[in-house]
Amino acid sequence: MGIRERLSGNEAVAIAMKQINPDVVAAFPITPSTEIPQYFSTFVNNGQVDTNFVAVESEHSAMSACIGSEAAGARTMTATSANGLSLMWEMIYIASSLRLPIVLSLVNRAVSGPLNIHNDHSDAMGARDSGWIQLFSENNQEAYDNTIMANRIAEHEDVLLPLMVCQDGFITSHSIENIELIEDEKVKEFVGKYTPKHYLLDDKNPMAIGPLDLQSYLFEHKAQQAIAMKNAKKVILEVSKEFEKMTGRKYGLFEEYKLDDAEYVVVCMNSTAGTVKQTIDELREKGIKAGLLKVRVFRPFPGEEIAKALSNAKVVAILDKADSLNGQGGALYEDVVSGMYNEKLTIPTVNYIYGIGGRDTTSKDIEKVYEDLIEINKSNKLENPYRYLGLRGDK
Amino acid sequence: MAYNLQEVMVNKPSRLTSGHRMCAGCGAPAVARMVLRALKPEDHAVIANATGCMEVSTFIYPYTAWTDSFIHTAFECAGATLSGTEAAYQSMKAQGKLPKDKETKFIAFGGDGGTYDIGLQSLSGAMERGHDMVYVCYDNGAYMNTGIQRSSATPKFADTTTSPAGSVIPGKMQNRKDLTKIMVGHHIPYAAQTLAMTNFKDLYEKAEKAIYTEGPAFLNIMAPCPRGWGYNTEDLMVINKLAADTCYWPLYEVVDGKYHITYKPAKKLPIEEFLKPQKRFKHMFKPGNEWMIKEFQEEVDRRWEELLELEQLTNKEN
Amino acid sequence: MTENKLNPKTPYQDLTIGGNIYDAGNAKEFKTGDWRSQRPVWIEEKCKQCGLCWPVCPDDAIPVTKEKKRTDFNYDACKGCMVCAKVCPFKAIEKEV
């Protein structure tokens, strides 16, 4: 039986990090993830962890230091949001290409500009092709649980990729919720020791990291990364199964909520799923077969599995909390639809861009989505598959 | 221990092998190799390298010329990268995860592009945080790797591909940044400026102090680039000597805030001696451009005088 | 020279991940001698073994014995910059014509 607590999402992640007790944390403050390094440096200065906390002078340096540290053979973690991730840009690609299993807590916030400190997923979506594993979390509990599982997944020898655990800025990072923590000893045992095969500080076997990698090699090295990302799917499921054994909390590639017999399905990520679930319950009472598919693992993207899970639906709405500004649709939408195409699943799908810059998304908004789905099904007409939810002036 | 070139030759192994792809006659490899020779042979090192000539020619997959552990990440973050590695070392050592009796030293190399310019912030951060590491700038006075573009280390009037000596604007119109003094301003325990001269004594001794001083240390080492500067490759050491003898590149160290000039030329040579053999300054010798040489000389003199005064002020023993 | 088993024919499965190299210093297997457009020649009789030519070599091409004596150039490494010849106080290194 775990420990019952009431914590904010940031606190929950910081406590997970304390229990993991990494060798190094290098981080730079940025709203809304600032509290994570704040809480964590308190643990460091009070001697509650063995970690060396590097208070770097920028996010670019945070990720650089994380790379230097992880390559040295140290388990290394960090946290950031939005523009912080933007400043890390160059380095997040380098972290993944050097195959360093760094774990980053990404507290999702709108990327500038104009400046906005509130939640959407534009930071995470921008990093979707950077070679990082991306796990999304509906609430504090999931942010905590995903963090506990993160090192195991990232450090697995078939994977060796960095991983970011995403949660919604302010909505979950700053809201206090009930949470069940795992005992320190159990976490320690679950996470285990970090034992890289090759590391810079191995003086008996010096190594070189980060070459000039020219035409004869870069393609092959990229293919290795792509295969590691595919391998991650299996590893995530294995680690999640083990986690379930320890806690009773079940995690897959995505969560299905009343999906089995659902005719009208919403696909979304992070905290919006909570609102969707509540709306579904209300609709179900009215006899409407509404359901939800909440994506937990966005990278690697489980396209095939999602398509199979959606195969009984009549109409699907895919909610993107970031606009791709590509004239075609949001990132989640495009990935789900291409997964469906490969599985020859041709049910009508509609994309909603919503919640940009922290715009509230209420159960009324979600109800409107389901009403649209019912209408599409009835009229058999889908005129604008790339649309907005909650935008003023939208027709 | 007194410096003895013969002893160094025999007892200090090369930690930067042949087979790297730096240009023939490049001033950087010999400098880097001698810095590394200042390591005790029994000590392990982790070398970080900013993107630049040195990096792209010493570690081209699948060959590395570094016999120690080596990491390259990007252009502007050798300081930050190595500070992470050093932090890992401190943490793991304290936790008993590394052998107790084995020392690892941390040395970063960056060109003037990766150090004076794009990497200045990450270098400053690493120095301020007090990591036990040495940052070595090999200053060849321009972005040589991308084809000789001006940097903030490029001397005034130099002809580069982004400050060409044109008919209206005669080369770079700004003075060079004094990075060593910026590093001294961080109040780190050891900062020094040197170059490869004769038997490398000055360079070797400063490298040894930098490596074995606890805490952050900075070395600024002039490393001529035959292509970018436009002189015959064989003249590398001649150019170095002229830089020191004209006081264009003063050799000094600052230990806990005390300045010590380690080489005072018996006869300070006029700056023309340094400028003349280099094509990048050729336009300064055209009739009518005498003012450029005069101005250059005045700036060299001003900085040299300032250095003498700083030594006087901070270090009465000299 | 042993052939590096990581080469442009190696399938991706057999390449090291991330471009790591675990054989530190293996560049010494890579020959740069064919870059040379000028060739330094060591005149042993004139050499006083002062050592000054040795540290200036950018390419580690001047071997030194345990007896503190330089030997003939490693022409697999020497790129022919002639820096060594210029620093020799005894004219013991000449440019081959």
Image: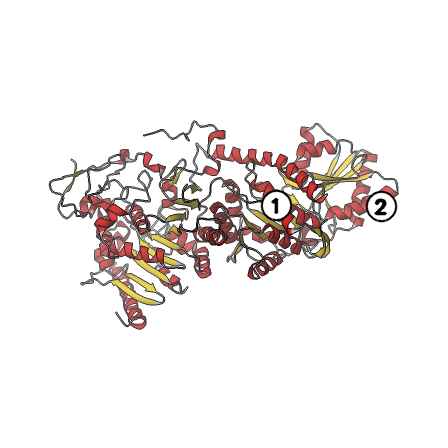
Q: Would residue B265 be visible to someone looking at this image? A: yes
Secondary structure state at the residue bearing disc 1: helix
Q: Which quadrant does the N terminus of chain B fall into? A: bottom left
* Residue extending farthest left: C45
Which residue is at 70% across, 56% downward? A7
Q: Residues within 10 Å of mark 1 (few under 14, many from 20)?
A: few
Which residue is at 36% across, 29% downward? C3
Q: Nearer the viewer, mark 1 or mark 2?
A: 1
Q: Chain of mark 2?
A: A
Secondary structure state at the residue bearing disc 2: helix
Considering depth in this image, is A195 or A98 the residue closer to the camera? A195
Asked if B264 appears above or below B138 in the picture, the reply is below
- Residue A249 position, x and y percent, is 72, 43
> Which quadrant would residue B288 be assigned to in this image?
bottom left
Residue marked by disc 2: A282
- Residue B167 position, x and y percent, is 32, 53
Considering depth in this image, is B200 or C68 the residue closer to the camera? C68
Residue marked by disc 1: A189
Q: Which amino acid, mark 1?
A: Glu
Q: Which amino acid, mark 2?
A: Glu
For the residues bearing labels 1 and 2, Cβ distance under 8 angstroms:
no
- Residue A81 position, x and y percent, is 60, 53
Dots 1 and 2 on the same chain: yes
Q: Is residue A109 left or right of residue C54?
A: right
Considering depth in this image, is B113 or B253 the residue closer to the camera? B253
